[in-house]
């Protein structure tokens, strides 16, 4: 199978103090660490497992600045066969639609049986790139994918729905799969594999290679931190006292 995995290098902000920069449209990145987007690491592993079962190739593709090549090399160390970086610095207003359009311009010249993406990126939470990419390539797609099995040119796919429901789909290939975290257990790259990947060539493409004139379908107006609301109140006292206080609070809130 010939597979493509779209990956993104994102800042790790879960345990970091996030500050808005002077433009009001980005965050201060100086003291942040960066890594492969979490859902993308599961997407990469899903592709590697299919390659190990059926053979074939994996192409890792990223729209990013030069630093994204470090993330692409991790993908190569884990099992990707080749890597391509699209120079993000040459394009502006990179929302979900334009990102998918740029990825499509590179992918359209590559033979593929399936494309894997993460279901979302942790830095923007658009959830758009996988579905839009599939529409632009005119192939089927599934989002929030929690299981993929391939046989006889078709994919048996499970995807998560609201309320804990699981939807089962049979899909013809080629198709795009936007993978949910937890679908598998992403492997670690060995030191030997990382050293080998350091010497592999990464193909870099830019505006001169992409004949695309598209306007973004959204405009980033402002970033801001959410306002701090009231903190939790810890009730103390005996069981009867706590129950009475809780009942009073509920009545004051108009809930009963």
Image (cartoon, grey):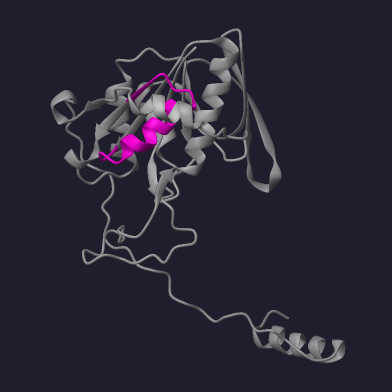
Where is residue 107 shown, x and y percent of the image? 33, 21
> Which residue: 32% across, 35% down?
69
Q: Residue furthest left?
A: 208
Q: Indicate yes or no whether the magenta region holds residue 79.
A: yes
Magenta-highlighted residues: 64-83
The answer to which image quadrant residue 208 occupies is top left
The answer to which image quadrant residue 254 occupies is bottom right
> Which residue: 41% across, 40% down?
128
Q: Residue furthest top?
A: 152
The answer to which image quadrant residue 152 occupies is top right
Q: How many marks?
A: 0
- Say which of 79 and 99 sits in front: 79
Where is residue 129 shown, x and y percent of the image? 39, 37
Q: Does the rendering let one see residue 60?
A: no
Q: Does the rendering let one see residue 86?
A: yes
- Say which of 142 and 73 sits in front: 73
Vertical placement of residue 39 versus 108, above or below:
below
Where is residue 205 shown, x and y percent of the image? 21, 27
Q: Indicate yes or no whether the magenta region holds residue 105.
A: no
Vertical placement of residue 65 versus 200, above or below:
below
Vertical placement of residue 16 versus 79, above or below:
below
């Amino acid at each position: 199978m010939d597979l493509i995995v779209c990956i993104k290098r994102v800042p790790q902000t879960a345990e970091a103090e996030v500050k808005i920069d002077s433009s009001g449209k980005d965050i201060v990145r100086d003291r942040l660490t960066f890594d492969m987007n979490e859902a993308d690491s599961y997407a990469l592993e899903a592709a590697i497992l299919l390659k190990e079962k059926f053979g074939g190739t994996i192409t890792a593709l990223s729209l990013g600045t030069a630093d994204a090549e470090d993330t692409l090399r991790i993908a190569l160390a884990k099992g990707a066969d080749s890597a391509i970086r699209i120079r993000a610095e040459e394009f502006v207003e990179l929302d979900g639609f334009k990102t998918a359009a740029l990825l499509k311009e590179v992918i359209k010249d590559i033979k593929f049986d399936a494309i894997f993406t993460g279901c979302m990126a942790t830095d923007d939470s658009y959830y758009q790139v996988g579905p839009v990419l599939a529409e632009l390539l005119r192939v089927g797609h599934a989002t929030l994918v929690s299981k993929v099995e391939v046989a006889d040119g078709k994919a048996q796919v499970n995807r998560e729905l609201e309320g804990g429901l699981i939807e089962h789909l049979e899909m013809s290939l080629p198709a795009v799969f936007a993978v949910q975290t937890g679908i598998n257990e992403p492997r670690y790259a060995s030191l030997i594999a990382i050293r080998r990947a350091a010497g592999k060539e990464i193909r870099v493409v830019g505006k001169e290679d992409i004949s695309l004139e598209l306007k973004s379908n959204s405009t980033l107006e402002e970033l801001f931190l959410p306002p701090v609301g009231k903190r939790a109140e810890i009730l103390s006292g005996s069981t009867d006292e706590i129950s009475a206080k809780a009942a009073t609070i509920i009545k004051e809130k108009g809930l009963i």
